[in-house]
Image: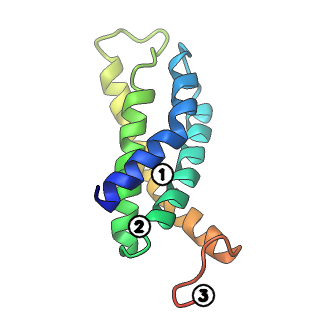
Amino acid sequence: MTVKELVLEQAEKTTAELKQSLKNLKSVALSEAWKALQLVVASTVQIVEAIAKDLEGKDKKAIAIEYINTFYDTTFTIIDIPLVPNLLEPIIHSYVKKVLMILVSSSIDATVSIFRQTGIFLQKGQV
């Protein structure tokens, strides 16, 4: 298995319970979706950092975004938006996802910075 495949597999195992609980909901408030995505970001960043130590930061971030993007697609796009015709739901889901994924990208950067500042991740060159 490649490093990317290992990361994606571990991330899936870590978020499986959250994903299953969200699938049982008929609707999710945007704030709740954001909270769930923050949990996924923090978990995924830790997994990527633990497994993909030899990759550059941009490559690690790309793997994290790929997983979070897949998580979003398999979890939130199946949720029905009340009072919106089924024909328009995919359009709304698409716009909401675009906004949230922009925020996720920034959140990954912030999470890595916080983890480094607090000693969860070591600075490059530290042992």
Residue 72 in the image: state x and y as whole percent: 42, 36
Amino acid type indicated by mark 2 = Ala
Q: Residues within 10 Å of mark 3 (few under 14, many from 20)?
A: few
Q: Quadrant of residue 89?
A: top left
Looking at the picture, does residue 46 appear above or below residue 86?
below
Q: Residue at x 66, y 70 (%)?
A: 120
Q: Quadrant of residue 70?
A: top left
Residue 21 in the image: state x and y as whole percent: 58, 23
Q: Earlier in the sequence, mark 3 or mark 2?
A: 2
Tell me whether the residue at label 3 lies in contact with that at label 2, contact meaning CB atoms closer than 8 angstroms.
Answer: no
Q: Secondary structure at mark 3?
A: loop
Discs 2/1, front? 2
Q: Earlier in the sequence, mark 3 or mark 1?
A: 1
Q: Secondary structure at mark 2?
A: loop
Q: Nearer the viewer, residue 72 or 20?
A: 20
The residue where tag 1 is placed is 104
Q: Nearer the viewer, residue 9 or 80?
A: 9
On residue 127, which mark appears?
3
